[in-house]
Amino acid sequence: MLARCYTVAFEGIEPRLIEVQCALAPGIPGFSIVGLPDKSVSESRERVGAALAAMALAMPAKRVTVNLSPGDMPKEGAHYDLPIAIALLAAMDAISRDAAESVLAMGELALDGRLVPVAGALPAALASASEDKALILPAPSAPEAAWVAAATVFGAESLGSALAHLAGTTPLAPARPPLSAAPAAVKSTDLASVRGQEGAKRALEIAAAGSHNILMLGPPGAGKSLLASCLPGILPPQTADEALESAMIQSVAGTRGAGPSPHRPFRSPHHGASMAAIIGGGRRAAPGEISLAHNGVLFLDELPEFQRPVLDSLRQPIETGEVWIARAEAHLRYPSRFMLVGAANPCRCGHMADASRACARAPRCGQDYMARLSGPLLDRFDIRIDVPAIPPSDLRGPLGEPSSEVARRVTAARKRQIQRLEPFGARSNADCPPDVLEEMTALDGDCAAFLQRAAAHFGISARGYSRILRVARTIADLDGAEQITRPHLSEAIALRGP
């Protein structure tokens, strides 16, 4: 007899419905799993057998065949344990086949029958809602899935409690989202504590308002990392759609949280990180730092110290807002629209601008050090600024403007951008589609001529030209201006830097 249950596989962050079919046939007792399972899925037969034994249930003395359909899609992960066990129990007539087919299940089984938390609860809840099926998960994973209001989610502590629920003897209570607020924001530094560096603070505000990539270049101790740590406190909150996208990526990556959060991600990987860690990949083609930073910030401190292939691999995701991870059997897509923040010393020792402290190779050492960054990557930074050393007299000066005031202006500017760009599928000036950029950044004759002269004088590329327009549009939004004016263009060109 054939019994069915349902679960999901993940293509990137997209859930794909998997039908788990179980058939019992006469013959030499055995347990086979087919349908392109990986090693962890194939090992389910041992975990399921041990879990049934812990419940005092014997495996049937028949040939057990489990098929994961569609059979041409690779299956990875231990979350197939629970649906395989449910389908097997239905085939053994321990529960009704209709009850098994009515649910979508995910969960790894311990040998004593306990259910172990799994990744991907939030996308699975979306899939169960679209298929109009109840979702059974391990109890620790259920609150995360319960944020999807359209889904009916049950959290089970063990295979026995899931079996009792499906048999109707001891129904499980529907899971509820956590009573606590959304996950806490990344700890940030208040801009008021940053002494001096007024020009860098202004550049940071503009970058946050328009989600522009920014590169800060300066000697050690000038405050580049400190300025970057202030970003989480001035970024606008995520929209509902952005929060759901970010939460789905974190769920698939196994970073379980309380659910969608208004706080934007802030990722700061070490410069020794590998290509797979930054871009994504590895044995299970997991999302990398650029995807975990989706809708937020990717901060690369000591930028030239990263491997050059890793840095150059950022160029395509910066332009498209997504990354494709190619495998022999599949191509996975992860969203990766992030704000890139880089910090770098001007040379190896960092003191090239100070003749009394610079090494004997200056300025050649600075040229060699910055040559680690390719021209195409540098061209993708909308804002490039120098962060000079702070004079001792500024270290005892008055406190500056707090992050809360800057955040208020940034949020107001971002709201203007969303109202203007939402019909075109964009959320910030940095993401404005090229085909509508000219309309969104219309210039009068004087401003157009001024920008053309500046582009010719500084040898600005076509990409640089469009990015200056985007930054100028953000500056105008911060000013509450409908039209870009010459002062806005002048500041945008100055922020483009050398």
Image: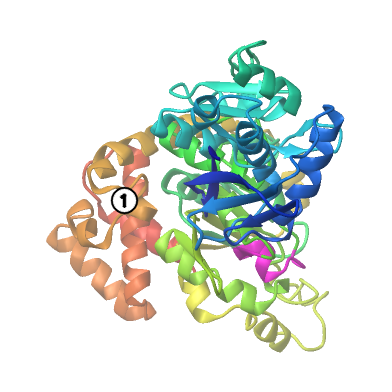
* Identity, as a three-letter code, of the amino acid under mark 1: Arg
Image coords of residue 179 (percent x, y): 64, 13
Q: Which residues are magenta?
A: 271-281
Q: Is residue 150 left or right of residue 451?
A: right
Image coords of residue 9 (percent x, y): 55, 49
Q: Which residue is at the front of the view, 307 or 485?
A: 307
Residue carrying label 1: 473
Image coords of residue 274 (percent x, y): 72, 69
Q: Quadrant of residue 260?
A: top right
Residue 288 visible at all:
no
Q: Is residue 465 left or right of residue 115?
A: left
Residue 439 visible at all:
yes
Residue 182, compared with residue 249, is above or below; it is above
Q: Which residue is at the front of the view, 388 or 355?
A: 388
**Does the segment drawn in magenta span residue 446?**
no
Q: Quadrant of residue 285?
A: bottom right
**Residue at position x 76%, y 71% from top?**
350
In which quadrant will I find the N terminus? Answer: top right
Label 1 neighbour load within 10 Å: few <14, some 14-19, many 20+: many
Image coords of residue 472 (percent x, y): 33, 54
